[in-house]
Amino acid sequence: MRLTQKLGSRITGRLSAHRRSRLAGPVVVLLALILTGGVFAFLSPASAEQKTADEDLVAKGRALFLVGCSSCHGKNGEGVPTEQGNQYGPSLVGVGAASVDFQVGTGRMPMAQPGTQALRKPPVYSEEETEALAAYVATLGPGPSVPSEAETSTEDVDEEGVVEGGEFFRTNCTACHNFAGAGGALPRGRFAPSLDGVSNKHIYEAMLTGPQQMPVFSDEVLTPEDKRHIIAYLNEREEAPKYGGFQLGSLGPVTEGLVAWLVGMGVLVGFAVWIAAHSTRSTKKKGGTA
């Protein structure tokens, strides 16, 4: 018992001596900070991984951006306003790499001249240059990243998924893109483009970013699996054989009604003229009766 008391007294005496040291306070504060940081790191939720692009790729993208894009979008992607309050090009802060990959990869950007709607055309930049531009714009602010090949692949989508994709398409997309994905007219001189021949990646990116007048279908609205099902449905519809005679662009009652009036009524009028021209005519005989 006495031995224990003596040992406790010695330990207490040493601690008291260290407390009076000038280094005691900073050491205690340092230990408290380390302990607090460790507990916070252990209990805090895992943060999302942020993919950092290669610095050389970003530098290359910035050089391309300054030459081909800054005249409309500004040197830092902030947009260039006009005197009327409009913009030559919108701000690119926060649009993400997916938006750049879609717009540049489909040839819609850069535009030859400002217009109501950017048209799809052969791309001006190569795939490597497009990747560099997307990497640079991604550094301007957080936004959707370019989907991977695995995210846009439809090889593992079964028939049930294709049927579900068709339901999603008819519910969310046919109002603008037509029941067959052939596109359609929109107000103010705009139109929804045809979806024929569009790659899986670009369809996915369009749903993810909402280019021009298209709404954004985020992952909270349509999950990545839902997007893949829609793409699988579009692929199957495009590959399916076309039955029923003339498709007339698959634009529905507009072209069908136009053909019905022009062709149908034209044929009826032609027949009426032909019948009138070849009907029996009465002739007046020369001379009178005796």
Image: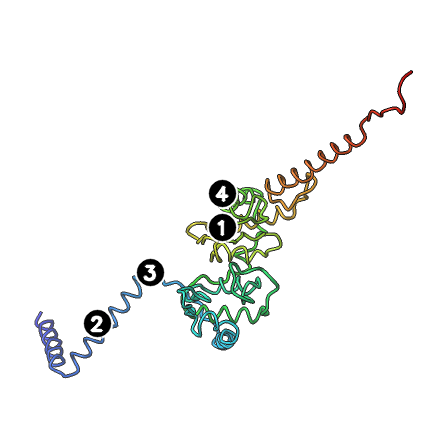
* Distance of label 1 from label 2 (alpha carbons): 64 Å
Q: Looking at the picture, tell me which residue is in the foreground, 224 or 284.
A: 284
Name the disc covering residue 171, or none: 4
Check disc 3 and report its element: helix, strand or loop: loop
* Distance of label 4 from label 1 (alpha carbons): 20 Å
Which numbered mark, 4 or 1, is in the foreground of this view?
1
Picture coordinates of residue 248, whole percent (x, y): 66, 44
Which numbered mark, 1 or 2, is in the foreground of this view?
1
* Distance of label 3 from label 4 (alpha carbons): 37 Å
Name the disc covering residue 144, or none: none
Dot 1 or dot 2, earlier in sequence = 2
Check disc 2 and report its element: helix, strand or loop: helix
On-image quarter of the N terminus: bottom left
Name the disc covering residue 45, or none: 3
* Distance of label 4 from label 2 (alpha carbons): 58 Å
Q: Looking at the picture, tell me which residue is in the foreground, 109 or 19.
A: 109
Labels 4 & 1 near each other (Cβ < 8 A): no
Q: Residues within 10 Å of mark 1 (few under 14, many from 20)?
A: few
